[in-house]
Amino acid sequence: NAGVMQNPRHLVRRRGQEARLRCSPMKGHSHVYWYRQLPEEGLKFMVYLQKENIIDESGMPKERFSAEFPKEGPSILRIQQVVRGDSAAYFCASSRDREAFFGQGTRLTVV
Amino acid sequence: QKEVEQNSGPLSVPEGAIASLNCTYSDRGSQSFFWYRQYSGKSPELIMSIYSNGDKEDGRFTAQLNKASQYVSLLIRDSQPSDSATYLCAVNFFSGSARQLTFGSGTQLTVLP
């Protein structure tokens, strides 16, 4: 049973470009969380999704950021018009019930 | 605002000692409690989950939960240098179909050989 898969592992974008981060949950998991982590800091909640629904996006910046979890395919975190402050590690976690398991993360660098 | 608080450390213990990590949470409705370990540059790894008051043991790890005091702890017995990592406390709040998995800021543990 494969774990949570995130890709790409590393992503470099120039300021103003779009970043698209993908997360494939573990088999049978219908809940996905996205977190952002800056160096030497904790995990900051961004958004919680179930299949085809955004349940809680209270941690998501109001502009430039969006997330989806379609019926088929991975969950996508999209960052439009990236700025240097978006450079961070982005982790997704999936869950079937209570326990959540993390992917390896995407390290986004904005140059 | 649901909060999870941890001592940021750093916490240093000698090899073979017991490391004790603590966490408090703000919402009495919290139902599930977790400890994750995160090595530098890696993703968090689930090491313990606990759902009811009392102790839960798994190998060298013991999680303790006291819902009345809104307190959860992790004990690591016979600490090894490989246990050196940041330990994250996480709390799951349920509300209808929604759930929030909120993390503390983590405690950095160093086990000295």
Image (cartoon, grey):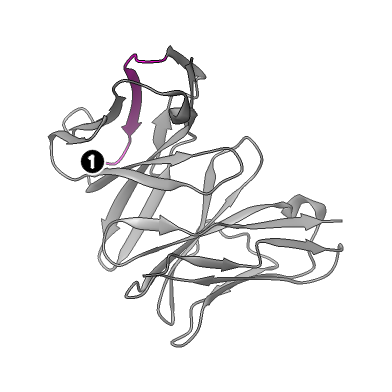
Residue B59: x %, y % from top left: 23, 34
- Visible residue check, residue B30: no
Residue plotted at (31% across, 50% down): B92
Tell me the amino acid under the disc marked 1: Arg
Q: Is residue B86 above or below residue B49?
A: above
Could you say which is closer to the camera, residue B23 or residue B83? B83
Q: How many marks?
A: 1
Most extreme residue toward the bottom, as rendered? Answer: A72
Residue B87: x %, y % from top left: 43, 34
Residue ID for mark 1: B28
Highlighted range, magenta: B15-27
As for residue B25 lying within the magenta part, the answer is: yes
Q: Is residue A89 above or below residue B35?
A: below
Q: Is disc 1 placed on a helix, strand or loop?
A: loop
- Visible residue check, residue B84: yes
Residue A30: x %, y % from top left: 35, 74
Mark 1 belongs to chain? B
Residue plotted at (43% across, 65% down): A3
Residue plotted at (65% across, 61% down): A9
As for residue A18 lying within the magenta part, the answer is: no
Assess disc 1: are there few (<14), some (14-19) or many (≥20) residues with their C-alpha within 10 Å of its C-alpha.
few
Q: Quadrant of residue B63?
A: top left
Residue A89: x %, y % from top left: 64, 52
